[in-house]
Amino acid sequence: MLLAAGGGRRLGGRPKALLDHRGRPLVEHALRVLREGGCGPVHVVLGAAAAGVREHADLSGCVLADNPGWEEGMGSSLRAGLASLTGTGADCALVMLVDQPGIGAAAVARVRAAGGSATSLVAASYGGKRGHPVLFGADRWADIAATAVGDRGARAYLKAHREAITLVECSDIAEEYDIDTVEDLFHLE
């Protein structure tokens, strides 16, 4: 699942999904990473400028989920994405954020390999610190959705269940920076 609904408030209102990365929208880079990491079908949560993302990005083969409450923060996008997965028969969902282009297919594959059951709870770690991507078993989705509020996403759930998390060190193959501000845009050059 790719969370790509943010409006880029700290980027002057430039939706992150449409930021240029190597000549294409950033959302396409993230989709390629998920697919090359072994994920599919990919569910993409859109919000800010959803029509523009649909028009300018190649989202073929994806399941698109709209988050009309995207301004509420990442929690609403996570809920929308989990709702789109409910009833699909998926055992788990690997969640990635559109604004982390330093995380590649190798990290996705590594996290994916550490989970896969309906009870899985796996997260990439960077120097021992939990980060993205994260993998949630389907048996956990309802509880995660119930606690996903504001910009904190699944943070409260993960904190409450930290003893159950399998951490997968990824600092040797990925960089967990975000594109949040204008100063961060150099990462996209």
Image (cartoon, rainbow, N blue to C red):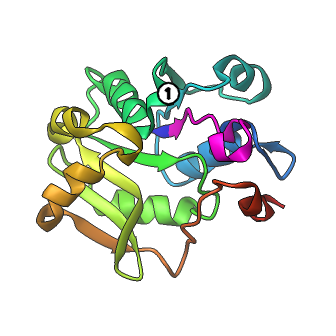
The answer to whether 119 is drawn above or below residue 188 in the figure is: above
Q: Residue at x 30, y 47 (%)?
A: 154
**Numbered disc 1: secondary structure:** helix
Q: Position of residue 150 (x, y in %)?
A: 37, 38
Q: Position of residue 142 (x, y in %)?
A: 18, 32
Front residue of this view, candidates 181 and 40: 181
Q: Is residue 184 visible to the viewer in this orientation of the structure?
A: yes
Front residue of this view, candidates 138 and 67: 67
Q: Position of residue 157 (x, y in %)?
A: 20, 49
Instruction: Tell me: 179 left or right of 24.
Output: left
Front residue of this view, candidates 132 and 172: 132
Q: Quadrant of the N terminus?
A: top left
Q: Is residue 116 visible to the viewer in this orientation of the structure?
A: no
Q: Residue 12 colored magenta? A: yes
Q: Amino acid at mark 1?
A: Trp
Q: Residue at x 76, y 19 (%)?
A: 55
Q: Point out the stretch of residues depicted in magenta.
A: 3-16
Q: Residue at x 27, y 24 (%)?
A: 86
Q: Residues within 10 Å of mark 1 (few under 14, many from 20)?
A: many
